[in-house]
Image: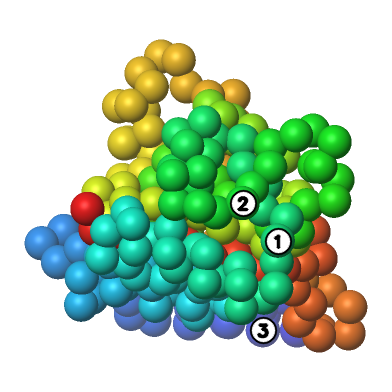
């Protein structure tokens, strides 16, 4: 009886019309991976960075950028600016901004100023590498991490930044290439957002056009 019922079920399944899978050709209409860069790369970068608790201060030129850095530090009553980059240090001196690069002052620094490789508009990220004079420590140690950048360093998407750094260094790529997207943060404990858990509590980019 059971065998007869089983055979009957199999017979019905075999007799049922078979539905063929429908494949839709979407090769002519690829789905974009990222949202478009709107309204332009500079504003897109600023909006994305500020969406993750970072700051982007747009400056008219180099002089304005350093004046904004001085203002930023004064508003936070921060006097311990640390900078290892030779070119940036020369500019700090020229614009009358006190800083130090002495190793003895490293542990006590309140803020650090560095350059960067590229800025990624779509994600609001800053690409840095170990090839910088600032070194790896300056990207994670300062409680307040300030970045000085030019508009010419902005690229649209992460792959554009990777292509650009490959073009810049060729076969001699830096040993470390990474991106920073806003201040360090975690929500591991009771799902409460904490800034500065594993790195800078404040992250600000001073971006000038020329």
**Residues tagged 1 and 2 counted as in contact (Cβ below 8 A):** yes
- Residue 120 in sight from this viewpoint: no
Foreground mark, 1 or 3, reads: 1
**x and y percentages locating residue 85 in the rendered image:** 54, 35
Is 85 located above or below residue 139 in the figure?
above
Res. 76 image quadrant: bottom right
Could you say which disc has been placed on residue 98 in the image?
2
CA separation, marks 1 and 3? 87 Å
Question: Badge 1: few (under 14), some or many (20 or more) residues near its Cα, within 10 Å?
Answer: some
27 on left or right of 62: left
Task: Say if mark 1 contacts mark 3, CB within 8 Å.
Answer: no
Q: Badge 3 is on which residue? A: 5
Viewer-closest of 138 and 32: 138
Colour convention: rainbow
**Which secondary structure, mark 3?**
helix
| Camera-nearest residue between 55 and 180 | 55
Under circle 2, the secondary element is loop
Q: Which residue is mark 1?
A: 79
């Amino acid at each position: 009886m059971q065998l007869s019922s089983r055979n009957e079920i199999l017979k019905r399944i075999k007799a049922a019309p078979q539905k063929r899978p429908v494949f839709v050709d979407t090769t002519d209409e690829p789905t974009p991976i990222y949202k478009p860069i709107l309204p332009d790369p500079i504003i897109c970068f600023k909006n994305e960075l500020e969406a993750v608790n970072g700051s982007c201060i747009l400056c008219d030129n180099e002089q304005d950028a350093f004046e904004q850095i001085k203002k930023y530090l004064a508003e936070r009553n921060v006097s311990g600016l640390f900078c290892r980059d030779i070119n940036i240090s020369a500019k700090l001196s020229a614009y009358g901004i006190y800083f130090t690069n002495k190793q003895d002052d490293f542990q006590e620094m309140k803020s650090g100023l560095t350059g960067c490789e590229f800025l990624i508009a779509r994600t609001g990220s800053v690409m840095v590498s170990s090839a910088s004079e600032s070194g790896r420590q300056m990207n994670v140690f300062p409680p307040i991490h300030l970045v000085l950048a030019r508009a010419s360093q902005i690229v649209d998407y992460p792959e554009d930044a990777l292509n650009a750094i490959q073009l810049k260094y060729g076969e001699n790529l830096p040993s470390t290439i990474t991106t920073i997207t806003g201040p360090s943060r975690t929500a591991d404990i009771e799902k409460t957002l904490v800034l500065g858990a594993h790195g800078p509590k404040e992250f600000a980019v001073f971006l000038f056009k020329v």
